[in-house]
Image (cartoon, rainbow, N blue to C red):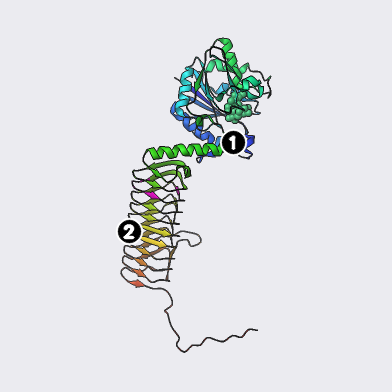
Amino acid sequence: MALNIVVMAAGKGTRMKSARPKVLHRLAGTSLLQHVLNSCVPLQAIRTVVITGHGADEVEASAHGDGLVFVRQVPQLGTGHAIQQVLGALDAKASTTLILNGDVPLIRADTAATLAGACAGSQLALLTIELADASGYGRILRDAAGGVRGIVEHKDASAAQRSIREIYTGMMAAPTAALKRWVMALQNHNAQGEYYLTDIVAMAVAEGVPVVATQAASETEVLGVNSPVQLADLERRFQRAHAEALMEAGVRLADPARLDVRGTLHCGNEVEIDVNCVFEGEVRLGDGVCIGPNCVIRDSTIDAGAVIHSFSHIEGAHVGPGALVGPFARLRPGAKLGEAVHIGNFVEVKNSTLAAGAKANHLAYLGDADVGARVNYGAGSITANYDGANKHRTVIGADVHIGSNCVLVAPIHIGDGATVGGGSTLSKNAPPGQLTVARARQTSIAAWSRPTKTKR
Ligand code: UD1
Ligand code: CA
């Protein structure tokens, strides 16, 4: 079945009290509009039109998807007026047009597909749901036989109509040709002086076009975002569902209420995640990985058996099998740790490779370095990788011992098996197998007495 999709995203979102267009606020790290567009992908519409208006430049620049078409609605005179603007952009070959809201982010692809299927190019299909508190929403009017007769907006509804709990979710699927006819005939004689898309329901009924109501599977997928409170509420619902899916797959979460996944988290078997961890982008955790509390991990892969201790910040890194990281470690983009590498507290690693068994356990910096197997990199040592204009590499061979508080001025090469004495600042290569020390020799003065100083 050929399909048009229209996503309404022109509204201002006054209640967000933000300069940012409402549909660009983020839920789980992705904009509200992009969530909707992502849900549209499996539907394979022949055309997807996004209606923009408020903050149109920004909204259009941020939305991505195959063959998206943008139509601007200026000024914004209501949902019916919005659809009037897109009629020319709809593909007439698609007999069904699905209308979604850019501020209802968690709509499921299968629900949208069911809605489009219920239309099937010939019926008007509405997505509805019963809410305990229906205030603010358009109510579904039914006749004695249960047939849908129309939608009345909250502001136009009588007291009796306001007691109806079945509401219109803002999503419908309509026969494309009839939709064009109906929206062109809309009037704005109502409480808000707007062109209501919802008025087309009564028009369909009057023409004898069947109107069907499809019930949404869950409240979460039809809840809209109008305020920061609603945004935070949906975020928690989304995260809870994500946490439950992970637990069903065997992941042990210390507390499903204290997990945030903003992207995709792939977990192997026997993975444990403590509280308050944030996963962003694409993160892969291998079998048996253990993540301590309060870690932030972004676009990284942690191999089997690795342990990430509390308060570690990891981005664009690859942690090898059985490695130990943290607490308080920072792995920056390009950090590649081999098997059983240890990175301890207050150690920063950037664009560096550490071969199997290498250790940097305390207060150190490794930037633009290649560190050999079994190297011990002492506390407080750093690579001076930046000369003020360019970055240079430090190469440390296998089995090297770098003492504490060393400065390795790159470019520099420390040969295999070398030992660098603590407190050395090296700006020349160190040969393999030898002790290299670059600091003043220690002296003691026997006949020395401390000068006496008198207070003035
Ligand atoms: C609309 C429905 C209401 C339904 C509710 C569900 C109408 C008249 N009413 O009401 O029955 O219960 O959604 O949330 O349709 N928009 C535009 N251009 C405009 C106006 C709105 O693009 O001129 C977009 C908004 O950005 C938003 C969507 O349409 O994405 C809905 O607009 P909104 O003002 O939130 O509709 P409601 O008054 O809540
Ligand atoms: Ca409104």
Q: Would you say residue 288 sits in the magenta stretch?
A: yes
Q: Which residue is mark 1?
A: 22
Mark 2 closeness class: few <14, some 14–19, many ≥20 residues within 10 Å: many
Which quarter of the rendered image does ligand 1 occupy? top right
Give the image location of residue 209, x and y in percent. Answer: 53, 12
Q: Earlier in the sequence, mark 2 or mark 1?
A: 1
Res. 157 in view: no
Q: Is mark 2 within 8 Å of ligand 1?
A: no
Secondary structure under the numbered disc 1 in the rendered image:
helix
Question: CA–CA distance between discs 2 and 1?
Answer: 50 Å
Q: Magenta region's main secondary structure?
A: loop
Q: Which residue is mark 2?
A: 357
Q: Would you say residue 139 sits in the magenta stretch?
A: no
Q: Nearer the viewer, residue 221 or 36?
A: 221
Q: Which residues are magenta?
A: 285-297
Give the image location of residue 297, x and y in percent. Answer: 44, 48
Identified by mark 1, the residue type is Lys
Does 141 appear above or below 218? above
Give the image location of residue 325, x and y in percent. Answer: 40, 55
Q: Is mark 1 within 8 Å of ligand 1?
A: yes
The picture quadrant where one finds residue 164 is top right
